Protein backbone atom coordinates (compact mmCIF):
# COMPACT_ATOMS: atom_id res chain seq x y z
CA UNK A 1 0.00 0.00 0.00
CA UNK A 2 1.54 3.31 -1.10
CA UNK A 3 1.96 6.03 1.49
CA UNK A 4 -0.14 9.16 0.99
CA UNK A 5 0.15 12.65 2.51
CA UNK A 6 -2.34 14.30 4.85
CA UNK A 7 -3.63 16.62 2.12
CA UNK A 8 -4.57 13.62 -0.03
CA UNK A 9 -6.84 12.02 2.59
CA UNK A 10 -10.14 13.65 1.46
CA UNK A 11 -9.83 11.86 -1.88
CA UNK A 12 -9.69 8.49 -0.10
CA UNK A 13 -12.82 8.53 2.09
CA UNK A 14 -14.08 4.99 2.70
CA UNK A 15 -10.73 3.41 1.87
CA UNK A 16 -7.86 2.04 3.92
CA UNK A 17 -4.68 4.07 3.53
CA UNK A 18 -1.16 4.30 4.88
CA UNK A 19 0.27 7.54 6.22
CA UNK A 20 3.54 8.24 8.02
CA UNK A 21 5.01 11.16 9.91
CA UNK A 22 5.78 12.48 13.35
CA UNK A 23 3.68 12.24 16.49
CA UNK A 24 2.56 15.85 16.71
CA UNK A 25 0.30 15.40 19.71
CA UNK A 26 -1.53 12.75 21.72
CA UNK A 27 -4.82 13.46 23.47
CA UNK A 28 -5.63 10.63 25.87
CA UNK A 29 -9.27 10.92 26.94
CA UNK A 30 -11.26 8.47 29.05
CA UNK A 31 -13.07 6.62 26.29
CA UNK A 32 -11.05 7.56 23.23
CA UNK A 33 -7.57 8.74 22.29
CA UNK A 34 -6.52 10.98 19.45
CA UNK A 35 -3.19 10.78 17.67
CA UNK A 36 -2.24 13.79 15.54
CA UNK A 37 0.34 12.88 12.93
CA UNK A 38 2.35 15.58 11.15
CA UNK A 39 3.88 15.14 7.72
CA UNK A 40 5.33 17.52 5.18
CA UNK A 41 1.88 18.55 3.99
CA UNK A 42 0.04 19.05 7.28
CA UNK A 43 -1.78 17.20 10.06
CA UNK A 44 -3.87 14.02 10.19
CA UNK A 45 -6.18 13.02 13.05
CA UNK A 46 -6.21 9.36 14.07
CA UNK A 47 -9.00 8.09 16.36
CA UNK A 48 -7.96 5.27 18.71
CA UNK A 49 -10.57 3.19 20.54
CA UNK A 50 -8.88 -0.23 20.65
CA UNK A 51 -7.36 -0.76 24.16
CA UNK A 52 -4.22 -2.44 22.80
CA UNK A 53 -3.52 0.36 20.33
CA UNK A 54 -4.20 2.91 23.05
CA UNK A 55 -1.72 1.18 25.38
CA UNK A 56 0.93 1.35 22.66
CA UNK A 57 0.06 4.98 22.00
CA UNK A 58 0.61 5.86 25.65
CA UNK A 59 4.23 4.71 25.34
CA UNK A 60 4.95 6.97 22.37
CA UNK A 61 6.41 10.45 22.77
CA UNK A 62 5.92 13.57 20.72
CA UNK A 63 8.14 13.62 17.59
CA UNK A 64 8.42 9.84 17.40
CA UNK A 65 8.20 8.76 13.76
CA UNK A 66 5.28 6.43 13.08
CA UNK A 67 3.39 4.72 10.30
CA UNK A 68 -0.39 4.44 10.48
CA UNK A 69 -2.66 2.19 8.43
CA UNK A 70 -6.34 3.06 8.89
CA UNK A 71 -9.73 3.75 7.34
CA UNK A 72 -10.48 7.30 6.10
CA UNK A 73 -13.79 8.61 7.44
CA UNK A 74 -15.43 11.97 6.77
CA UNK A 75 -15.64 14.26 9.81
CA UNK A 76 -16.19 18.00 9.25
CA UNK A 77 -14.61 18.88 12.61
CA UNK A 78 -11.33 17.08 11.90
CA UNK A 79 -8.35 18.54 9.99
CA UNK A 80 -9.18 18.65 6.26
CA UNK A 81 -12.65 17.27 7.07
CA UNK A 82 -11.51 13.66 7.52
CA UNK A 83 -10.08 11.41 10.20
CA UNK A 84 -8.57 7.94 10.39
CA UNK A 85 -10.25 5.13 12.32
CA UNK A 86 -9.44 1.52 13.32
CA UNK A 87 -5.72 2.22 13.03
CA UNK A 88 -2.65 0.09 13.18
CA UNK A 89 0.21 2.24 14.52
CA UNK A 90 3.79 1.15 13.95
CA UNK A 91 6.80 3.15 15.19
CA UNK A 92 9.48 3.54 12.52
CA UNK A 93 12.20 4.14 15.09
CA UNK A 94 12.78 4.40 18.82
CA UNK A 95 10.71 6.74 20.95
CA UNK A 96 11.92 10.29 20.34
CA UNK A 97 13.39 12.47 23.05
CA UNK A 98 10.91 15.38 23.21
CA UNK A 99 12.36 18.79 22.34
CA UNK A 100 12.57 21.49 25.05
CA UNK A 101 9.36 23.14 23.78
CA UNK A 102 5.93 22.00 22.64
CA UNK A 103 5.64 21.86 18.87
CA UNK A 104 1.89 21.22 18.98
CA UNK A 105 1.07 24.62 20.45
CA UNK A 106 -0.11 27.32 17.99
CA UNK A 107 2.97 29.43 18.67
CA UNK A 108 6.44 28.59 19.88
CA UNK A 109 6.78 30.00 23.38
CA UNK A 110 10.54 29.42 23.59
CA UNK A 111 12.82 32.42 23.21
CA UNK A 112 14.44 32.94 19.82
CA UNK A 113 17.93 31.95 21.10
CA UNK A 114 16.47 28.69 22.42
CA UNK A 115 14.77 28.05 19.10
CA UNK A 116 18.01 28.72 17.22
CA UNK A 117 19.99 26.47 19.57
CA UNK A 118 17.53 23.66 18.75
CA UNK A 119 16.87 24.64 15.13
CA UNK A 120 16.55 21.11 13.69
CA UNK A 121 13.44 20.54 15.81
CA UNK A 122 12.19 24.14 16.17
CA UNK A 123 11.93 24.38 12.39
CA UNK A 124 9.36 21.58 12.48
CA UNK A 125 6.86 23.95 14.06
CA UNK A 126 4.29 24.95 11.43
CA UNK A 127 4.99 28.68 11.80
CA UNK A 128 8.74 28.27 11.38
CA UNK A 129 8.46 25.88 8.44
CA UNK A 130 5.82 28.12 6.83
CA UNK A 131 8.30 30.98 6.61
CA UNK A 132 10.80 28.71 4.88
CA UNK A 133 8.13 27.54 2.42
CA UNK A 134 7.41 31.17 1.59
CA UNK A 135 11.13 31.74 1.08
CA UNK A 136 11.35 28.81 -1.32
CA UNK A 137 8.28 30.00 -3.22
CA UNK A 138 9.73 33.51 -3.53
CA UNK A 139 12.93 32.13 -5.04
CA UNK A 140 10.91 30.01 -7.47
CA UNK A 141 9.01 33.14 -8.52
CA UNK A 142 12.28 35.03 -8.89
CA UNK A 143 13.69 32.40 -11.21
CA UNK A 144 10.49 31.98 -13.22
CA UNK A 145 10.13 35.72 -13.81
CA UNK A 146 13.68 36.14 -15.05
CA UNK A 147 13.69 32.95 -17.09
CA UNK A 148 10.63 34.27 -18.92
CA UNK A 149 12.62 37.39 -19.78
CA UNK A 150 15.55 35.47 -21.27
CA UNK A 151 17.87 35.80 -18.28
CA UNK A 152 20.43 33.03 -17.75
CA UNK A 153 21.14 31.65 -14.29
CA UNK A 154 24.85 31.69 -13.42
CA UNK A 155 26.94 30.35 -10.55
CA UNK A 156 29.94 32.39 -9.47
CA UNK A 157 32.83 31.64 -7.07
CA UNK A 158 32.25 32.08 -3.36
CA UNK A 159 35.97 31.99 -2.62
CA UNK A 160 37.93 34.86 -4.14
CA UNK A 161 41.55 35.94 -4.23
CA UNK A 162 41.14 39.56 -3.15
CA UNK A 163 38.88 41.55 -0.84
CA UNK A 164 37.93 44.25 -3.34
CA UNK A 165 34.28 43.53 -4.15
CA UNK A 166 32.64 45.97 -1.74
CA UNK A 167 33.26 48.16 1.25
CA UNK A 168 32.30 45.39 3.67
CA UNK A 169 34.74 43.54 5.86
CA UNK A 170 35.69 40.07 4.70
CA UNK A 171 36.23 36.60 6.08
CA UNK A 172 39.78 35.46 5.35
CA UNK A 173 40.75 31.84 4.89
CA UNK A 174 43.71 29.72 3.88
CA UNK A 175 43.59 28.48 0.27
CA UNK A 176 46.37 25.90 -0.10
CA UNK A 177 48.79 28.21 1.66
CA UNK A 178 47.58 31.38 -0.05
CA UNK A 179 45.26 34.02 1.38
CA UNK A 180 41.69 33.92 0.11
CA UNK A 181 38.34 35.39 1.12
CA UNK A 182 34.68 34.47 1.19
CA UNK A 183 32.88 36.49 -1.48
CA UNK A 184 30.95 39.53 -0.27
CA UNK A 185 28.94 39.68 -3.50
CA UNK A 186 28.87 38.24 -7.02
CA UNK A 187 28.96 41.83 -8.31
CA UNK A 188 32.10 41.70 -10.44
CA UNK A 189 31.30 38.29 -11.89
CA UNK A 190 27.71 39.07 -12.81
CA UNK A 191 28.89 42.21 -14.61
CA UNK A 192 31.45 40.20 -16.55
CA UNK A 193 28.79 37.66 -17.49
CA UNK A 194 26.69 40.43 -19.05
CA UNK A 195 29.45 40.35 -21.67
CA UNK A 196 28.50 36.72 -22.31
CA UNK A 197 24.72 36.40 -21.92
CA UNK A 198 23.54 40.06 -21.69
CA UNK A 199 21.05 39.13 -18.95
CA UNK A 200 22.03 37.04 -15.92
CA UNK A 201 20.92 36.22 -12.40
CA UNK A 202 22.17 34.22 -9.46
CA UNK A 203 20.79 32.83 -6.20
CA UNK A 204 23.55 32.23 -3.72
CA UNK A 205 25.17 32.98 -0.36
CA UNK A 206 27.21 36.09 0.34
CA UNK A 207 29.37 36.77 3.38
CA UNK A 208 29.82 40.02 5.29
CA UNK A 209 32.26 40.08 8.23
CA UNK A 210 30.72 43.17 9.73
CA UNK A 211 30.09 43.25 13.50
CA UNK A 212 26.41 44.09 13.16
CA UNK A 213 24.30 42.68 15.97
CA UNK A 214 20.87 43.81 14.79
CA UNK A 215 17.55 42.25 13.84
CA UNK A 216 18.19 42.97 10.14
CA UNK A 217 21.78 41.79 9.59
CA UNK A 218 23.36 38.38 9.09
CA UNK A 219 26.99 37.48 8.41
CA UNK A 220 25.82 35.03 5.73
CA UNK A 221 22.64 35.58 3.80
CA UNK A 222 21.09 34.62 0.47
CA UNK A 223 21.40 37.22 -2.25
CA UNK A 224 19.17 37.29 -5.32
CA UNK A 225 21.36 39.03 -7.89
CA UNK A 226 20.42 40.36 -11.32
CA UNK A 227 22.42 42.14 -14.01
CA UNK A 228 21.29 43.19 -17.50
CA UNK A 229 22.92 44.83 -20.48
CA UNK A 230 21.89 47.44 -23.02
CA UNK A 231 20.08 49.69 -20.55
CA UNK A 232 19.48 53.39 -21.10
CA UNK A 233 20.00 54.14 -17.42
CA UNK A 234 19.01 52.94 -13.95
CA UNK A 235 15.30 53.31 -14.70
CA UNK A 236 15.45 50.29 -17.01
CA UNK A 237 16.89 48.33 -14.08
CA UNK A 238 14.15 49.58 -11.77
CA UNK A 239 11.51 48.38 -14.25
CA UNK A 240 12.99 44.87 -14.22
CA UNK A 241 13.13 44.94 -10.42
CA UNK A 242 9.46 45.90 -10.26
CA UNK A 243 8.53 42.95 -12.49
CA UNK A 244 10.75 40.64 -10.46
CA UNK A 245 9.12 41.59 -7.17
CA UNK A 246 5.67 41.05 -8.67
CA UNK A 247 6.81 37.64 -9.91
CA UNK A 248 8.19 36.69 -6.52
CA UNK A 249 4.92 37.56 -4.82
CA UNK A 250 2.99 35.67 -7.49
CA UNK A 251 5.21 32.67 -6.78
CA UNK A 252 4.38 32.90 -3.09
CA UNK A 253 0.65 33.12 -3.84
CA UNK A 254 0.86 30.13 -6.18
CA UNK A 255 3.11 27.85 -4.15
CA UNK A 256 2.76 28.88 -0.51
CA UNK A 257 -0.91 29.72 0.03
CA UNK A 258 -1.22 27.28 2.94
CA UNK A 259 1.92 28.71 4.55
CA UNK A 260 0.45 32.20 4.30
CA UNK A 261 -2.73 30.98 5.99
CA UNK A 262 -0.67 29.39 8.75
CA UNK A 263 0.99 32.75 9.44
CA UNK A 264 -2.21 34.72 8.89
CA UNK A 265 -0.70 37.07 6.32
CA UNK A 266 -1.69 38.50 2.96
CA UNK A 267 0.47 39.71 0.10
CA UNK A 268 1.18 43.36 -0.66
CA UNK A 269 0.39 44.73 -4.09
CA UNK A 270 3.27 45.88 -6.24
CA UNK A 271 2.13 49.12 -7.92
CA UNK A 272 2.25 49.26 -11.71
CA UNK A 273 4.80 52.01 -11.13
CA UNK A 274 6.54 52.03 -7.76
CA UNK A 275 6.78 55.60 -6.40
CA UNK A 276 10.28 57.08 -6.52
CA UNK A 277 11.91 60.06 -4.81
CA UNK A 278 15.39 61.50 -5.26
CA UNK A 279 17.75 61.15 -2.34
CA UNK A 280 17.63 64.89 -1.66
CA UNK A 281 13.84 64.78 -1.50
CA UNK A 282 13.98 61.67 0.69
CA UNK A 283 16.05 63.57 3.25
CA UNK A 284 13.45 66.30 3.35
CA UNK A 285 10.55 63.85 3.74
CA UNK A 286 12.39 62.00 6.53
CA UNK A 287 13.25 65.23 8.34
CA UNK A 288 16.98 64.60 7.98
CA UNK A 289 19.67 67.29 7.57
CA UNK A 290 20.26 68.25 3.93
CA UNK A 291 23.93 67.26 4.20
CA UNK A 292 23.21 63.77 5.52
CA UNK A 293 25.27 61.33 3.36
CA UNK A 294 23.00 58.29 3.82
CA UNK A 295 19.64 57.17 5.16
CA UNK A 296 19.51 55.82 8.70
CA UNK A 297 16.97 53.13 9.69
CA UNK A 298 14.78 55.81 11.29
CA UNK A 299 14.77 57.72 7.98
CA UNK A 300 13.77 54.57 6.11
CA UNK A 301 10.88 53.97 8.50
CA UNK A 302 9.67 57.55 8.01
CA UNK A 303 9.86 57.13 4.25
CA UNK A 304 7.92 53.87 4.46
CA UNK A 305 5.15 55.60 6.39
CA UNK A 306 5.13 58.42 3.82
CA UNK A 307 4.90 56.00 0.89
CA UNK A 308 1.99 54.20 2.52
CA UNK A 309 0.16 57.44 3.38
CA UNK A 310 0.79 59.32 0.11
CA UNK A 311 0.82 56.50 -2.44
CA UNK A 312 -0.77 53.51 -0.70
CA UNK A 313 2.43 51.59 -1.48
CA UNK A 314 4.54 49.26 0.64
CA UNK A 315 7.40 49.92 -1.77
CA UNK A 316 9.42 53.08 -2.44
CA UNK A 317 12.41 53.76 -4.66
CA UNK A 318 15.02 56.22 -3.42
CA UNK A 319 17.19 57.26 -6.36
CA UNK A 320 20.27 59.42 -6.83
CA UNK A 321 22.31 58.44 -3.79
CA UNK A 322 25.50 60.51 -3.41
CA UNK A 323 28.40 59.09 -5.40
CA UNK A 324 30.53 59.27 -2.26
CA UNK A 325 28.34 56.56 -0.69
CA UNK A 326 28.26 54.25 -3.70
CA UNK A 327 30.90 51.80 -5.02
CA UNK A 328 33.39 53.08 -7.60
CA UNK A 329 31.70 51.14 -10.41
CA UNK A 330 28.47 53.14 -10.02
CA UNK A 331 27.50 55.35 -12.95
CA UNK A 332 27.08 59.04 -11.99
CA UNK A 333 24.04 61.05 -12.95
CA UNK A 334 25.18 62.90 -16.10
CA UNK A 335 23.19 65.98 -15.06
CA UNK A 336 24.29 65.96 -11.41
CA UNK A 337 27.67 64.19 -11.20
CA UNK A 338 27.76 64.35 -7.40
CA UNK A 339 24.76 62.01 -7.38
CA UNK A 340 24.51 58.52 -8.83
CA UNK A 341 22.31 56.58 -11.20
CA UNK A 342 21.85 54.26 -8.24
CA UNK A 343 18.86 53.41 -6.10
CA UNK A 344 17.60 51.57 -3.07
CA UNK A 345 14.18 49.98 -2.80
CA UNK A 346 12.50 50.25 0.59
CA UNK A 347 9.93 47.62 1.54
CA UNK A 348 7.70 48.63 4.44
CA UNK A 349 10.26 51.12 5.64
CA UNK A 350 13.39 48.99 5.36
CA UNK A 351 16.08 48.82 2.68
CA UNK A 352 15.53 45.63 0.70
CA UNK A 353 17.33 46.18 -2.59
CA UNK A 354 20.39 48.12 -3.74
CA UNK A 355 21.00 48.62 -7.44
CA UNK A 356 21.79 50.98 -10.24
CA UNK A 357 23.55 51.59 -13.51
CA UNK A 358 27.26 50.63 -13.69
CA UNK A 359 30.15 52.14 -15.54
CA UNK A 360 30.86 50.29 -18.78
CA UNK A 361 33.90 52.06 -20.30
CA UNK A 362 37.44 51.06 -19.40
CA UNK A 363 38.65 54.65 -19.17
CA UNK A 364 35.84 55.50 -16.76
CA UNK A 365 36.97 52.73 -14.44
CA UNK A 366 40.53 54.03 -14.44
CA UNK A 367 39.27 57.52 -13.66
CA UNK A 368 36.92 56.31 -10.93
CA UNK A 369 39.66 54.35 -9.17
CA UNK A 370 42.10 57.23 -9.47
CA UNK A 371 39.53 59.65 -8.03
CA UNK A 372 39.26 57.42 -4.94
CA UNK A 373 43.00 56.99 -4.66
CA UNK A 374 42.84 53.28 -5.31
CA UNK A 375 45.34 51.33 -7.44
CA UNK A 376 44.14 49.47 -10.51
CA UNK A 377 46.14 46.30 -9.87
CA UNK A 378 43.80 44.64 -7.32
CA UNK A 379 40.95 45.07 -9.82
CA UNK A 380 42.94 44.20 -12.95
CA UNK A 381 41.12 40.96 -13.80
CA UNK A 382 37.79 42.72 -13.51
CA UNK A 383 38.59 46.06 -15.13
CA UNK A 384 40.43 44.49 -18.05
CA UNK A 385 37.19 42.98 -19.38
CA UNK A 386 35.90 46.48 -20.10
CA UNK A 387 38.69 46.99 -22.64
CA UNK A 388 37.04 44.31 -24.76
CA UNK A 389 33.62 45.89 -25.13
CA UNK A 390 30.84 45.98 -22.55
CA UNK A 391 27.36 47.45 -23.09
CA UNK A 392 25.70 49.96 -20.77
CA UNK A 393 24.39 47.78 -17.97
CA UNK A 394 23.04 47.70 -14.44
CA UNK A 395 21.56 45.43 -11.87
CA UNK A 396 20.40 44.89 -8.32
CA UNK A 397 20.54 42.51 -5.38
CA UNK A 398 17.67 41.46 -3.11
CA UNK A 399 18.33 40.11 0.39
CA UNK A 400 16.11 37.04 0.59
CA UNK A 401 15.87 36.76 4.37
CA UNK A 402 15.07 40.44 4.72
CA UNK A 403 12.37 40.13 2.04
CA UNK A 404 10.71 37.20 3.82
CA UNK A 405 10.95 38.91 7.21
CA UNK A 406 9.19 42.02 5.91
CA UNK A 407 6.62 39.91 4.10
CA UNK A 408 5.74 37.78 7.12
CA UNK A 409 6.05 40.54 9.71
CA UNK A 410 8.90 38.78 11.53
CA UNK A 411 10.68 41.09 13.95
CA UNK A 412 14.06 39.45 13.33
CA UNK A 413 15.53 37.97 10.13
CA UNK A 414 16.69 35.00 12.20
CA UNK A 415 13.04 33.96 12.58
CA UNK A 416 12.88 33.22 8.85
CA UNK A 417 16.40 31.77 8.46
CA UNK A 418 16.91 28.04 8.92
CA UNK A 419 20.42 28.14 10.38
CA UNK A 420 21.50 31.77 10.79
CA UNK A 421 25.14 32.82 10.87
CA UNK A 422 25.91 36.05 12.66
CA UNK A 423 28.31 37.69 15.08
CA UNK A 424 27.60 35.11 17.77
CA UNK A 425 26.28 32.01 16.04
CA UNK A 426 28.19 29.38 14.11
CA UNK A 427 26.11 26.35 15.12
CA UNK A 428 24.00 24.34 14.62
Image (tube, grey):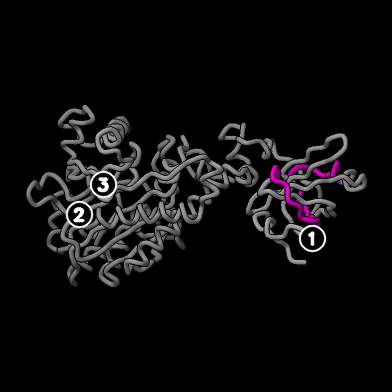
> Which mark lies nearer to you, 3 or 2?
3
Secondary structure state at the residue bearing disc 2: helix
- In three-dimensional space, the C-alpha distance between marks 3 and 2, rounded to whole angstroms, equals 14 Å
Pointers 2 and 1 in contact (C-beta within 8 Å): no
Secondary structure state at the residue bearing disc 1: strand
Dot placed on the residue nearer the N-terminal end, 3 or 2: 2
> Which mark lies nearer to you, 2 or 1?
1
Dot placed on the residue nearer the N-terminal end, 1 or 3: 1
- In three-dimensional space, the C-alpha distance between marks 2 and 1, rounded to whole angstroms, equals 60 Å
Across and down, in percent, residue 112 comes to 56, 35
Across and down, in percent, residue 162 comes to 33, 57
The residue identified by callout 3 is 274
Which stretch did the figure color magenta? 57-78
Is residue 264 in sight in this rendering?
A: yes
State whether residue 403 is above or below residue 307: below
The residue positioned farthest toward the left in the image shown = 335
The residue identified by callout 1 is 16
Side of 174 where 316 appears, left or right: left
The residue identified by callout 2 is 234
Across and down, in percent, residue 274 comes to 26, 46
Side of 55 where 137 appears, left or right: left
Secondary structure state at the residue bearing disc 3: loop
Is residue 219 in sight in this rendering?
A: no
Q: Residues within 10 Å of mark 1 (few under 14, many from 20)?
A: some
- In three-dimensional space, the C-alpha distance between marks 1 and 3, rounded to whole angstroms, equals 53 Å
Amino acid sequence: MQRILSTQLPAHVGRTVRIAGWVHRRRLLKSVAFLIVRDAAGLSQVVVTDPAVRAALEKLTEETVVEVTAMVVANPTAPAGVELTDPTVRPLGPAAVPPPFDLYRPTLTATLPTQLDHAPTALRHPTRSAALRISAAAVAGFRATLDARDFVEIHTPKVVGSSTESGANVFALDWFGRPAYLAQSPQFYKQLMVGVFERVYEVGPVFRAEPHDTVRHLAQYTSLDVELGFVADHRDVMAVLRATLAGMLAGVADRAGAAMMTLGIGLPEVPAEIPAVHFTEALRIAGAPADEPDLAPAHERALGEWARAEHGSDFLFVTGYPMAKRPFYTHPDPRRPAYSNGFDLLFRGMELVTGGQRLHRYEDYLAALAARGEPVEPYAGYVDAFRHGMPPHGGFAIGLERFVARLTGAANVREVTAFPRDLHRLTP
